[in-house]
Image (spheres, rainbow, N blue to C red):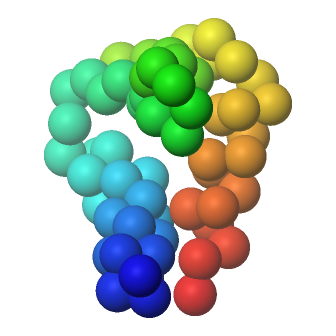
C-alpha cells in the first residue's frame, strides 16, 4: 500500500508541476467516491473550477507532497 500512496503523490505533484505546462487542456476528476466528480477544467492558463473545496484539497495535496 505504501508504494501506491507514494506513486499517487508523485503523480499528483507531477500533474500540476510538470504535465500542466505540456498539455493544452486538462480535466481534474476526483474518483475517491462512488462516481468520478469533476473538480476543474484547465484550458491554457484558464482554470474553470466546478467544486472549489474539492479542487483546493487536490491542489493542496499536490503542493505539500514530499
| Left or right of 26 in this view: 36 | right
Image position of 8 with respect to 5: above or below: above
- The image shows residue 15 at horizontal and vertical percentages of 36, 53
Foreground: 39 or 4? Answer: 4
* Residue 13 visible in image: yes
| Left or right of 59 in this view: 16 | left
| Left or right of 4 in this view: 38 | right
Q: Quadrant of residue 49?
A: top right
| Left or right of 23 in this view: 31 | right
Foreground: 18 or 64? Answer: 64
Q: Residue drawn at (63%, 11%), measured in percent from left and top? A: 50
* Residue 42 visible in image: no
In the picture, the quarter occupied by the C terminus is bottom right
In the picture, the quarter occupied by the N terminus is bottom left
Image position of 13 with respect to 44: above or below: below
- The image shows residue 65 at horizontal and vertical percentages of 59, 77
The extreme right residue here reads 53
Image position of 55 with respect to 41: above or below: below
Q: Residue drawn at (43%, 53%), measured in percent from left and top? A: 16
Q: Quadrant of residue 52?
A: top right
Q: Quadrant of residue 33?
A: top right
Q: Residue drawn at (46%, 34%), measured in percent from left and top? A: 31
Image position of 34 with respect to 8: above or below: above
- The image shows residue 9 at horizontal and vertical percentages of 46, 71
Q: How many marks?
A: 0
Amino acid at each position: 500500500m505504501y508504494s501506491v500512496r507514494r506513486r499517487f503523490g508523485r503523480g499528483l505533484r507531477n500533474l500540476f508541476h510538470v504535465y500542466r505546462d505540456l498539455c493544452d487542456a486538462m480535466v481534474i476528476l476526483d474518483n475517491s467516491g462512488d462516481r468520478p466528480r469533476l473538480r476543474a477544467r484547465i484550458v491554457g492558463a484558464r482554470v474553470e473550477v466546478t467544486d472549489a473545496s474539492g479542487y483546493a484539497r487536490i491542489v493542496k495535496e499536490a503542493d505539500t507532497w514530499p
